[in-house]
Amino acid sequence: METAVKKELQILACKIRMGVIEGVHAAKSGHPGGSLSCADIMTYLYFKHMNIDPKNPKMENRDRFVLSKGHAAPVLYATLAERGFFSTDLLKTLRKPDSILQGHPDMKNIPGVDMSSGSLGQGISAAVGMALSAKHFGNDFKVYTVLGDGEIEEGQVWESAMFAANKGLSNLIAIVDFNNLQIDGTIDEVNSAKPIDKKFEAFNWHTIIIDGHDFEQIENALNEAEKIDKPVAIIANTVKGKGVSYMENNVSWHGSAPNDELYEQAMAELKAQFEALQ
């Protein structure tokens, strides 16, 4: 990857992280930790990889994306806004009664959202259905879904994995945001699904393990996935709360919003990162 391209992606990811903080602070609620951890993945998907058009959100042959970990909606909204699907001004309306940007993605009212999600374990099922439909009707679009590492403790995830492999859904790429923390503590403390890669392999998926904050590794993994004739699971090792020092690896920021003082600190840190990239 060229240095200029990597820097461009890093700048975009930084702006998206600022959008996450803006939204949850304005809402006084939301899920910043798991939004920040997958910001780099979202940046690469929406700005470099997926076939999408903000001017035509319902383009028939667009690639589809499902945020299976729907509570991380702030990062999806910040990404869509930065990509041009709607104004970034809307981010400050997160979770307000008259806003289209509610606590979980809504495909009926938000441009660029392909599937409503929020009930954990169900988003990947929707992604499997989309991929199966594409195979059935001869469409060549890809389907991408991002899951949480806590989410994959849900049995429905593994039913979907079994079905996807059985149907040969090579147009399906699942990315697990493996930040090692969920609402009640570490993955190991709650109900570990480790080793995640071996479990997906047991269901006949191709697996790739990457650093989910390294754009070159993200690029290489997605390019590899395009060449595989079976469903692909990318296990992305990430840091919960990435980019904000007091949120990093801190489970208390799974579903909490910063107060005014902590908001200023978070934005100052992210702005410093942004300026260092200029």
Image (cartoon, grey):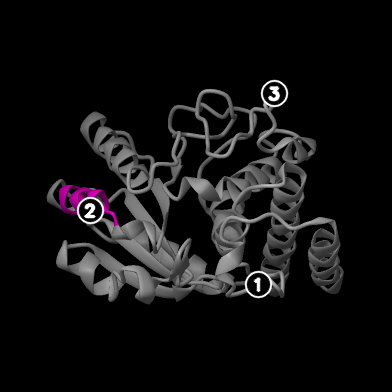
Relative side of 52 to 205, left or right: right
Please provide percent x and percent y for residue 91: 73, 40
| Label number found at residue 2 | 1
Say which amino acid is labelled 1: Glu
Circle 1 Cα neighbour tier, 10 Å, few/some/many (<14 / 14–19 / ≥20) = few
Residue located beneath label 3 in the image? 98
Please provide percent x and percent y for residue 58: 51, 26
Looking at the image, tell me whether mark 1 or mark 2 is earlier in sequence order. 1
| Residue at (52% x, 72% y) in the render | 238
Relative side of 43 to 62, left or right: right
Which mark is nearer the camera, 1 or 2?
Answer: 2
Residue 227 appears anywhere in the view? no
Say which amino acid is labelled 3: Asp
Q: Nearer the viewer, residue 145 or 183?
A: 183
Q: Which residues are magenta?
A: 154-164
Relative side of 145 to 227, left or right: right
| Residue at (57% x, 24% y) in the render | 109
Residue located beneath label 2 in the image? 155
Say which amino acid is labelled 2: Gly
Looking at the image, tell me whether mark 3 or mark 1 is earlier in sequence order. 1
Please provide percent x and percent y for residue 261: 85, 62
Q: Compute the Cα span from label 3 to label 1.
A: 43 Å
| Label number found at residue 97 | none
